[in-house]
Image (spheres, rainbow, N blue to C red):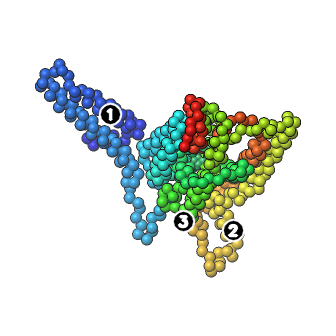
């Protein structure tokens, strides 16, 4: 019996799921056969009935055991006791959740897909704001408080950057799934992930109360921050320096109920700001939002404010708390061909200049950016200490713990300098790319401000619309083109 149990425990998640499905199917077959066959004698029928009952209960037992074994897998992650020290050492509190079993991680992916499918259906088919709201509550509870904000799609882009630039890092399949699946949904249906599945967006959303309308230029200016954040996050992840999105995530500490005081304050500021400036983190910080915005622009089945056609009633004009509704352009905005040509030539000149300026700025600041890397900082500290012995002769001098740890490791300092130099070179290349990228984005943003698209109807901006479904309730047009009077 023991080897059978061990074999079952060692089955992969997929095999176990298949065995469970098979067991469920068997249960149905057994139940069906229990209803008896009129051609059998009483004795035969009673014998079959007994056999069926035994089969039924043993299959049921197997099913319970298999489902229960998922929990055993999870518990296995914790089966070794934490090390005991007799030196008064206090076990540090972990900042990230304990690892989950593979089975539960796959379950998270399944929940993600189900929640995305449901919210997409609610937005595109049912056009239900209340449905989206309840999914948001679910996401706060499941991906937020239960899963403690990890793994999250927003942070997963750092794992992708790390995997791309460090062949030694094997990215977990579930993290890859959390990165790709919301992008795929955005590609087809718009940002339904932001609507109610992302726990960071959902927690801000429920705080929206009296949202202010921000002017276009403020939105465009603040909208540049996510690009800078995205660039820095990729740079620091690619150089194995840090996962800054996770480190400065304002809500994850709230979800884990163990944030440092400063992070509680930061999270509190974001939530308080959400009351008047809807979803400030999503609109002016989220680096993953940049990718979702790009992908959503070409989405095939994006939500529309009106179910059929826009009658220009203007009722939805101020309904979007995120300023994502594009108003029709009046005819007088149309410019002469000559003006359009002039501006086009100007932009052609300005964009490459901004890119070059960005590359130059990146080059100038690469050492400052590299200082964030702990190895580079350690090398600089040791170099300064060795080149100025007066630093360590003062009576108040306490050797930094990182230097003390390095010295006791026995590693030659020359090797540390060499590794730090290599890192600084990586930062030089990365910072120049970052500068060039930001120069291009600034140039395109300028271009976007001065290019008009001639729109006739009220439409959501496919890039910035978070598919929250609020504006739909303001539209008086019904499914059949008829007008609906809403109280
Ligand atoms: S913008 Fe970012 S934080 Fe906001 S809902 Fe979308 S992915 Fe989440
Ligand atoms: S669905 Fe889009 S356009 Fe409509 S209110 Fe929500 S974010 Fe704004």
User: Residue pushed farthest top?
Assistant: 39
The residue to which callout 1 is attached is 24
Quarter holding ligand 2? top right
Which secondary structure lies at badge 3?
Answer: helix
Task: Residue at 48% x, 60% y: name it.
Answer: 257
Image marks 1 and 2: residues in contact by CB distance under 8 Å: no
Q: From mark 1 to mark 3, how far is it between C-alphas?
A: 49 Å
User: Which one is in front, 370 or 40?
Assistant: 40
Q: Position of residue 355 (x, y in %)?
A: 78, 46
Q: Position of residue 362 (x, y in %)?
A: 74, 53
Task: Residue at 41% x, 37% y: name it.
Answer: 14
Q: Position of residue 367 (x, y in %)?
A: 72, 58
* Residue 426 shows in the view: no
The residue to which callout 2 is attached is 384
Task: Residue at 14% x, 28% y: name it.
Answer: 46
Q: Position of residue 154 (x, y in %)?
A: 57, 48
Q: Is residue 268 left or right of residue 346?
A: left
User: Residue pushed farthest left?
Assistant: 43
Quarter of the view holding residue 8 = top left
Foreground label between 1 and 2: 1
* Residue 205 shows in the view: yes
Q: From mark 2 to mark 3, how far is it between C-alphas?
A: 33 Å
């Amino acid at each position: 019996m023991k080897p059978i149990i061990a074999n079952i425990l060692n089955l992969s998640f997929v095999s176990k799921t298949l065995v469970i499905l098979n067991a469920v199917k068997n249960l149905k077959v057994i139940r069906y056969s229990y209803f008896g066959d009129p051609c059998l004698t009483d004795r035969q029928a009673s014998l079959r009935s007994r056999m069926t009952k035994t089969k039924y209960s043993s299959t049921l037992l197997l099913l319970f055991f298999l489902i229960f074994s998922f929990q055993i897998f999870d518990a296995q992650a914790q089966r070794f006791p934490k090390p005991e020290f007799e030196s008064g050492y206090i076990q540090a509190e972990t900042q990230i959740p304990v690892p989950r079993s593979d089975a539960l991680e796959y379950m998270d992916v399944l929940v993600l897909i189900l929640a995305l499918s449901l919210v997409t259906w609610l937005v595109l088919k049912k056009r239900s704001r209340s449905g989206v709201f309840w999914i948001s509550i679910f996401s706060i509870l499941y991906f937020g408080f239960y899963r403690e904000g990890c793994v999250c799609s927003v942070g997963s882009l750092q794992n992708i950057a790390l995997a791309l630039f460090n062949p030694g890092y094997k990215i977990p399949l579930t993290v890859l799934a959390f990165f790709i699946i919301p992008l795929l949904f955005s590609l087809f249906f718009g940002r339904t992930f932001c609507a109610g599945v992302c726990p960071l967006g959902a927690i801000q959303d429920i705080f929206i109360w009296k949202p202010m309308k921000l002017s276009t230029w403020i939105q465009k200016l603040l909208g540049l921050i996510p690009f800078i954040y995205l660039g820095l996050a990729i740079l620091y992840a690619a150089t194995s320096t840090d996962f800054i999105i996770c480190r400065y995530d304002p809500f994850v500490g709230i979800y884990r109920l163990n944030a440092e005081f400063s992070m509680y304050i930061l999270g509190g500021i974001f939530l308080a700001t959400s009351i008047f400036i809807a979803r400030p983190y999503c609109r002016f910080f989220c680096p993953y939002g940049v990718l979702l915005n790009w992908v959503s622009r070409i989405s095939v089945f994006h939500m529309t404010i009106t179910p059929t056609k826009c009658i220009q009633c203007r009722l939805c004009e101020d309904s979007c708390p995120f300023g994502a509704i594009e108003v029709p352009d009046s005819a007088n905005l149309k410019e002469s061909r000559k003006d359009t040509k002039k501006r086009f030539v100007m932009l052609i000149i300005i964009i490459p200049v901004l890119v070059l300026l960005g590359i130059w700025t990146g080059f100038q600041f690469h050492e400052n950016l590299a200082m964030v890397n702990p190895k580079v900082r350690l090398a600089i500290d040791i170099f300064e200490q060795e080149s100025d012995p007066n630093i360590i002769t003062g009576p108040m001098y306490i050797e930094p713990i990182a230097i003390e740890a390095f010295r006791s490791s026995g590693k030659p300092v020359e090797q540390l300098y060499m590794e730090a130099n290599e890192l600084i070179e990586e930062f030089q290349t990365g910072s120049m790319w970052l500068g060039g990228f930001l120069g291009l984005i600034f140039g395109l943003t300028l271009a976007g401000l001065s290019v008009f698209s001639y729109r006739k109807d009220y439409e959501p901006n496919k890039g910035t619309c978070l598919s929250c479904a609020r504006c739909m309730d303001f539209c008086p047009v019904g499914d059949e083109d008829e007008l609906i009077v809403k109280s």
